Amino acid sequence: MADYDHRPRGGRGGYNNRKRRYRDEDDYDRRPQRRRYEEPLSVKVRKQLLAIAESPLKRVEDEVYSIAKVVADNHEDAELRKSFEDLALQLVVEQPFKTPFVASVVLAINALKSDFVDSIIAKAVTEFDSAISRGEWREVKLLMKFLGCLQGILEGDGVFPVLQDILTKAVELQTENSDDTLGPELVKIILFTIPYIMVSSGSDAIEKAASMIENTDIIASEPHVLQALVDPYPGNGKEDATPPTSVLQLLQKQLSNEATNGWELACLPRPWKLLQDAEQEITIANAPKHVLPPVNLPEVLVAGPRALFPELYFSVYANQDVETVPPTTDIASCLLRDALIDTINILDYNRNATAKFLIDLDCYFSPGTFVKRATPFDRLRDIDGDRSTWKPEDVAVDAVFSQLFQLPAPEHKLVYYHSVLTEACKIAPAAIAPSLGRAIRYLYRGVDSMDLELSYRFMDWFSHHLSNFGFTWKWTEWIDDVELPSLDPKKAFIQGALDKEIRLSFAQRIKGTLPAPYQQLITEEKEKDTPDFKYNDEATPFAADGRELMSLVKKKSPEDAIEPIITRIQSTAKDLNLPLPPLYYSTDAYVTSICYIGSKSLSHVLSCIERCKDRLLASSEARSQIIESVMAYWKDQPGIGVNIVDKLLNYTILSPDSVIEWALGKSGSNLSESAIFEMVAATVGKVTGRVRQVVKSTQEPDIPADEKATLQETVDRERQSMKELFELMEDKLTGWASGSKDQMLDGRGVTDEESAMIVQWGERYLRVFRRRGAVEEAWFLDQSKIVVPAAVEEMKVDIPEPETVEID
Amino acid sequence: MPAAVRNTVDRLDKPSAYYQGRNKRKYNRDDDREDRPKTPDEPAEDPLKDATTLYVGNLSFYTTEEQIHELFAKCGEIKRLVMGLDRFNKTPCGFCFVEYYTHQDALDCMKYIGGTKLDERVIRTDLDPGFQEGRQYGRGKSGGQVRDEYREEYDEGRGGLGRAIQAERMKEEEEYGKGR
C-alpha cells in the first residue's frame, strides 16, 4: 500500500496550506482517479514476503503456504524467481526474526516444486562465502541460521560439516593465541546455529549436535582474558558484586542442558510444523533433498570491521520477585537476546522499524512464550504456576539496555539506542513506560557498583529520555538521597542528571518538575543566563583592571591598548608577592572577560576567542589558569564550560595534558562531578580519535614511499603523545585511588568517610581509562595486521618538473 | 553489493521529499530557459553525497545554541552551528544549520535525532549541501520563515499565529474601529 498511496486525503491544516486552500471549497476530490491496474506478481509476492509473520491476525502457515504456492506455480517467471530469492536472503540478514518463516516458505516450495530450491541454497552459500571474506561475522551467523532451518531438506549431514570446519578454524586460532577473540566469535556462530537446526524439519541431528557441543566446550567454557575489562559491575569495593558471565559460557551450558532434556527449545517457532498440521496438500517431512554446495573458508580469516570483545550477559531485570524475563538458566534468555540485538543493530537506519519489531516481539516466537502484551507487573503474580510470566516489553527493553551498556562500546552511537527506546515508548507508552521505570530503578540501585563509564551513559540516556517526555519522573522515590554528600555516587547521579536536563532545557523548567527537597539543587545562580562578572565586585583583586580590560576587549580595541593593562596587572601581582605567577592574574582577567563577553551564546564566545587567540596562544605557560577561569566563570553551568574547553583544545590554545592535569590533578573531590568526567572523556576521545585517523591515513593505497615515511613519523609521534597522556592519567589517578594524595574539600581537610569515597572515585576512573588505553592498543595491533598494498614501483615514473611557460 | 539495492525497510537517512521536489523543479526550470544539451548518460553528481551539514527545522524561537549543541553533539563533534535569524530583527526564527566533521555523523543525525524532541518540540532534520552566507535569514515576507507567515494554528514557540494572518487581523480590527 505504502508504495502507491502516500498522500493523505485531507491534506489541509499542514503548514503552507495556502496552496491547498482551494480544496476547502470542494466537497470531494475531483482529480481523476489513478487508473487501477493489476500489480506484477513479483511485487505482490514481495509485499507478502516482506510482511510475513508480522500480523497477529493472520495465520502464519497460511501466509507461508500462499507465498510458496504462487512462487511454485509461477516458477517460470524469471523476474518473480529472482525477486523472491533476493528478498528471501535479504530478509534473513536484515530482519532476522523472520528467518524461520522465510525458511518455511522455502520448505513449502520444496514440497511443491523441488527443483526450484537448488538455486536459493546456492545463493545462500555464495552470500555466506562473501560474508566470511568480508569478516562480517553477524551475517555469517544469520545465513548459517537460515541454512540450519533448512537442515531437513539438505542431503547427508547438511550443515554439520560446515560447522565442523568453522570449529576447526576456531580451535586453530585459539591454539595459536589464547587471547584471540575471533575463535570465540566463531564458536558463538556454531552454538547459535544448533538450536535452529534442532527445531528444523531435519530429524537425525541429535547425536551430531551433542557431539558438536561437546567439542565446543573447550573454547566456550573458558572465560576470556579480556572479560574482566568489560565487566559492567566491577563492584567498586562493594561485596555483592556478581562475577560476570559471558554469553558464550552461558549458551554452552544451556545447550548442554537442552541436549539432556530432549531439545525442547520451547520459545523457537516451528512454522513448518504448523504447515504440516494445517492439512495443506503438501508434506514437509519426506520431500526431496538437496546437496549443500561446499563453502569456502579461506586459510586466513579476516577479523572484520568491528573489534571483537567478549560479550557479557547483561540484564536490568535480574532478581525480581516475579520473573519478567527468562532466567539465565533458560536457553530462551540467549536465543531471544541474540535475535533481538541483531535486529536492533542491523536496523539502525530506521529506528521506527526497530521499535515496531520490539513491540511485536511475541509474533515471532512460539505462542505462550510471553504473557499478553502490556500485562502490568502486579498482575503477573496471579498467573498460574506453569504459565510464562515473561513480559515481551521487558525482554525487548532489556536487549536495548544490553547494548546501551555494552563495554567497551556498542556497535552504533549511544544516541541510537536512546532513540529506539524513545520510539518504543511513543508506540506503546502503556506497555513500555512501566518497564523503563523498573529498569531505571534497578540501574539506580546499582549505580555505586557500576562501571563509571556506564553510570555516565545511564545519566546521559536518562536525561535525554526525560527530555522527550516532558521531564516527568517520580523524583519522590529518591528524596532520601538528596541529603547524601556530593561524593556519594547516587547523589552524584542525581546532580549530574539534573545538570544534563537543564542543558537540554533551562533551569526554571527543570526546577518546576522537581519536588521541594530537590529545589536546593538548582540554585539561583544556575538560573542566571549570564553569570556575574567577578570584577564588578570591588572585593575581587584587580577589580578595576578587570573591568577596564573587559571593556577594551568588548570594544575590539587593538592589542597595544590591551597590553598596558595586562602589564599593569602583572607588575602589581609581582609587587604584592602574590602566590601564583603574575601571568596567571592577567590571564584570569583576560579569559574571564572573554567568557563574560561571550556569555550570550556559543558563537559569541567563539568569535571572541577567535579575535583573542594570539594572546591566548602565547599564554601557554598559564594553560591551567585558562581552564580555571573558564570553569570558574561557568561554575554553575559547567556543561558550557566543558564545551568552551573543548573548543580551546581545537584551537590548540589548550593541550590535552593541560586539561587532564587540571581535571585530575587538582582535587580528588572533583571526580564525582559529571562535568569533570565529561571533560576528561572528551579530551581522551579527541586524542585517540586523532591517532586512529592518522593510522587510517597510512592505509590508503598508492602512497609513495617518501610520503609514507612522513606519515609513519606522524603515527609514531601521535601514538607517543597518546601514551604519555595515558601515563599522566595513570599517575594522577593512582594518587587518588591509593589515597596517597592530600585531599581537600571546600578548603578543609576531608573526613575518613570522604577520603574513602575519593579513593573509590579514583579506582572507578582508573578502570575506565585503563580500559580505553587497552582498547586503543588492541585496535592498533589489529590495524598493524592489515596488509596495505604498497605503491607499485614500476608504475612510478619520474616526471620531470614541467618548465614554466609564460602565457600572456 | 551495488548501492541500488533497496533495504527491506525504508532508510531515515535519505533527503526529504521537500529537498528532492525542490531540486526537480529547479532542474525543469533550467531546462526550459536555456536549451542546454542534455547529457543523460552522465548523471549529475549528487550534491548530498558527502554532505556534512543538516538543516534543522521546527525549532522554538527560544531554543538556544547551547541546547542545540547539547543534543546534536550526541552524533559527533559539531564543526559549526549557524542559527537561522529573522532577516530584519536578527532574532532566532526557528531553524538552524548544524555542520559536522564527517558525512557519517550527518547521516547518523538524520537517523537518530531527526523527529525526536528538542526543547519539547519535534524537530525536523534534512541533509543539506552546505551553508552559504545569506541562508541564515528567513525568506518570509516579514523576515522569518515562510511557513510562519500563513500558519493558522497558534504556536507559542513560534510567535503565535502566522504573521501575515496576524497583520490581516490587526488591519481588520482597525478598520472595524474606524467604521464605528
Image (cartoon, coloured by chain):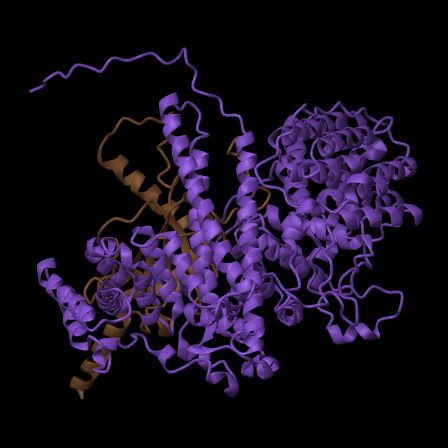
Chain colours: A purple, B brown
Quadrant for the N terminus of chain B in the image? top right
Which residue is found at the position 17% from the left and 14% from the top?
A803
Rendered position, A92 above or below A587 = above
Is B141 left or right of A387, judged from the image as shown? left
Rendered position, A109 above or below A655 = above
Rendered position, A111 above or below A525 = above
Q: Is residue A11 visible?
A: no
Rendered position, A356 above or below A347 = below
**Hey, which quadrant is residue A296 in on the image?**
top right
Which residue is found at the position 77% from the left and 28% from the top?
A165
Q: Is residue A604 visible?
A: yes
Which residue is found at the position 53% from the left and 59% from the top?
A734
Residue in the foreground of this view, choosing between B58 and B81: B81
Residue A461 position within the rendered picture, expressed as x and y whole percent measured from the top left: 54, 63
Residue furthest left in the image: A808
**Hey, which quadrant is residue B44 in on the image?**
top left
Residue A345 position within the rendered picture, expressed as x and y whole percent measured from the top left: 60, 48
Is A457 left or right of A524, judged from the image as shown? right
Residue in the foreground of this view, choosing between B4 and A275: B4
Residue A282 position within the rendered picture, expressed as x and y whole percent measured from the top left: 86, 37
Residue A532 position within the rendered picture, expressed as x and y whole percent measured from the top left: 27, 77
Is A10 left or right of A363, judged from the image as shown? left
Residue in the foreground of this view, choosing between B152 and B138: B138
**Hey, which quadrant is residue B35 in on the image?**
top left
Quadrant for the C terminus of chain B in the image? bottom left
- How many labels sit on residues? 0
